[in-house]
Image (tube, grey):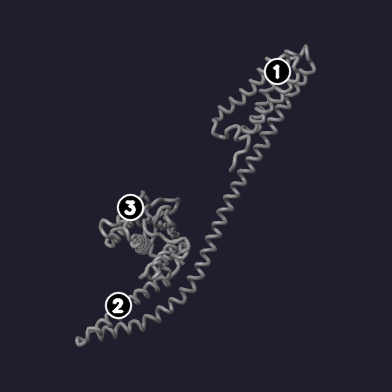
Amino acid sequence: MGLTSLDIWFIGNRIPVWVRICLVAAGILVISVLHQLTPPSKVHWHNAFQNLDYLPIVLAGWKFGWRGGLAAGLFAGLSNLPFSIEIWSTYPNFAIDQTWDIPLFCAAGTFTGVLTGRERRQRAELERTTHQLTRVYQTLHDNFEQMKRAERLFALGQLSAGLAHEVRNPLASILGAAGILQRNVRLEKREAECLAIIIKECDRLNHLVAHFLAFARPRHPSYQTVEVGPLIDSVLSLASHAVEKGRIVLLRDIQPLGPIECDPELVQQVLLNLVINSIQSMADGGQVLVRTRPIENRVVIEIRDEGCGIPPGDREKIFDPFFTTKETGTGLGLSVAHKIVEQHGGILSAENNPDKGMTFTVQLPTHRARQHET
């Protein structure tokens, strides 16, 4: 919010209160001294000094409210009173005018303080309203995005559940027939190679169908009270088998956290998937940092890598089923992870790092989210 001209002139809130009070008092006293030093015959100069008193009075009302303005007005009137008494016998009319300026000083300071207080209250109310509207807009935007995603996932889930079952039966028949043929010792080399390809591709399709069913019908979480630190340690221990020594380094920054209620196997699946993705994104090596921090009644787990990152245009699609940037990826790993986190009442998000790589953030409630159990 920009400063007003008076704030700039008075150097805003950087000056301590007592210094501001001294500056106002000093300004009034300087004007009073000018009255004393100027000959009484120079009425026009005294009028100018009298009007100049309004400046520190208005400043006092502006910075300290109506009480400060009233006090400054009284102080200005009392500081000029000795001069008014001194010229009473010589210039009685001018002395009376000087005396009548005292209530005007007090009125000016009080009125300025009242207006300032009202303006500050309105400004504070406007800031609160703006903040609330921003939060409401963000909530509506998030809900709208979730609704669009839920519609897509519902349609895809209905299709995938039936399709996966229909594919599995002929797939099992093909795999079984290929196994029978493979046991024939009189196979030629080319025939054996073809059967090996059939069995390999059937296994790959079976793996894809299993992921498909896990996405379409994920199992219900079995909640337990667990510590986050040991859970992350187990994930890093499993992920270390996929790390080439000296090329990729796994780091941890675990803040002291209390226990949380979750399904440890499902949460471990999510975190392991994210860590493995980070490892696979760093073809030239680098570091993967797993960091935790508490936020109110939630636990935040961040997985930060130094990989190739995701283009801004694809970032909103990474949690959609079958979207992948890998040549051999199924595009279901992040979708399943996103659904598991949602089951726990949490949030899974991803952002590009300022320098390079990605940071995936998992927010989980510390206590069981009962509204998500259905």
Residue at 43% x, 76% y: name it: 161
Q: Is residue 301 visible?
A: no
Side of 61 relative to 180 (left or right): right
Nearer the observer, 83 or 162? 83
- Count neighbours of disc 3 (C-alpha within 10 A) and say few if under 14, some if 14 to 19, many if 20 or more: some
Q: Which residue was labeled with disc 2? A: 200
Q: Which residue was labeled with disc 3? A: 252
Which of pointers 1 and 2 lies earlier in the amino acid sequence?
1
Residue 355 at x, y = what percent? Answer: 41, 53
Residue at 36% x, 56% y: name it: 306
Q: Of discs 1 and 2, which sits in the foreground?
A: 2
Residue pushed farthest top? 89
Q: Which residue was labeled with disc 1? A: 81
Nearer the observer, 78 or 178? 178
Residue 285 is labelled as none
Q: Using the image, determine if residue 255 lies above or below residue 368.
A: above
Q: CA distance from mark 1 to mark 2?
A: 105 Å
Which of pointers 2 and 3 lies earlier in the amino acid sequence?
2
Side of 174 relative to 296 (left or right): left
Q: CA distance from mark 3 to mark 1?
A: 74 Å
Q: Using the image, determine if residue 201 lies above or below residue 87.
A: below
- Count neighbours of disc 2 (C-alpha within 10 A) and say few if under 14, some if 14 to 19, many if 20 or more: few
Residue 215 at x, y = what percent? Answer: 41, 70
Element class at badge 2: helix
Task: Say which amino acid is labelled 3.
Answer: Arg
Q: Using the image, determine if residue 40 lies above or below residue 349.
A: above
Q: Using the image, determine if residue 322 lies above or below residue 66.
A: below
Residue 223 at x, y = what percent? Answer: 38, 62
Task: Say which amino acid is labelled 2.
Answer: Lys
Residue 314 at x, y = what percent? Answer: 46, 64
Nearer the observer, 209 or 225? 209
Element class at badge 3: strand
